[in-house]
Image: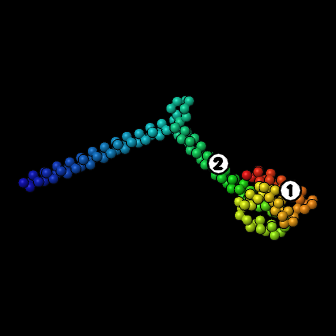
Amino acid sequence: MFLAILLTLACSFLVQCATIILAGRWLRAKEEELRAELGDMLHSLVTPPDEKTPAPLAQYADVIATLLAARFVQQVKTMLAGTASGESRAETGMVVAESMAGLPPVLGVLAQMLPKNLQKKLLSNPQMVGALGSAFGAGRGNNHTESHTDNGTLQERMRRQG
């Protein structure tokens, strides 16, 4: 009986050793198979299918470059639009100051206190600026025609900005 147990243990040990050896060989074969597949996939990615068609990797690179260029152009446009907006705001402030220069000081200060949208409406209509100036006693004589001419150029500026 002892011999049967010993023989059973020896057979079990040999089966386990054979299993480990066979599993190792199977794993090595699978590894070689996967490496060959990966090499074939990389080769097909880099080599073109025919002479007229570029390689898939080149096509992917072209798509990525196009997307990156589009994003870059978008960023530059946004940056330039922000710069132009700042310049436009500064010019609008100068235009407001120029148009209010011919008015009495009290009216100029009051006009600066108006909300921006009302200032723009006031500046878009030069007759209103002239009417306000004449209502407060400014713009009589030669100054009135100069003020009207200045407002005409002001109106042209506002059209260009708008």
102 with respect to 159 (left or right): right
Counting residues from the start of the chain, the first of labels 1 and 2 encountered is 2
Q: Residue furthest top?
A: 51
- For the N terminus, which image quadrant? bottom left
Label 2 crowd bin: few (<14), some (14–19), many (20+), radius 10 Å: few
Residue at x-position 90% and y-position 62%: 140
Task: Please determine whether, in this image, residue 112 is positioned above or below residue 24.
Answer: below
Q: Residue 23, percent across and down?
A: 28, 46
Tags 1 and 2 touching, CB below 8 Å: no
Work out which residue is located at the far right of the displayed protein and give it.
142
Secondary structure category for the residue under label 1 = helix
Q: Mark 1 points at which residue?
A: 148
123 relative to 74 in the view: left or right: right
Which of the numbered marks, if any, corresponds to residue 120?
none
Amino acid type, callout 2 = Val
Give percent across and percent down for residue 6.
Answer: 13, 54
Front-most of 102 and 134? 134
Q: Is residue 54 visible?
A: yes
The residue drawn where x is 59% and y is 43% is 66
| Residue nearest the viewer, comparing 141 with 26 | 141
Residue 122 position within the rendered picture, expressed as x and y whole percent measured from the top left? 76, 59
Which residue: 51% across, 35% down?
A: 47
- Seen in the picture, residue 64 relative to 110 is either above or below; the reply is above
Residue at horizontal 41 percent and vertical 39 percent from the top: 37
Residue type indicated by callout 1: His
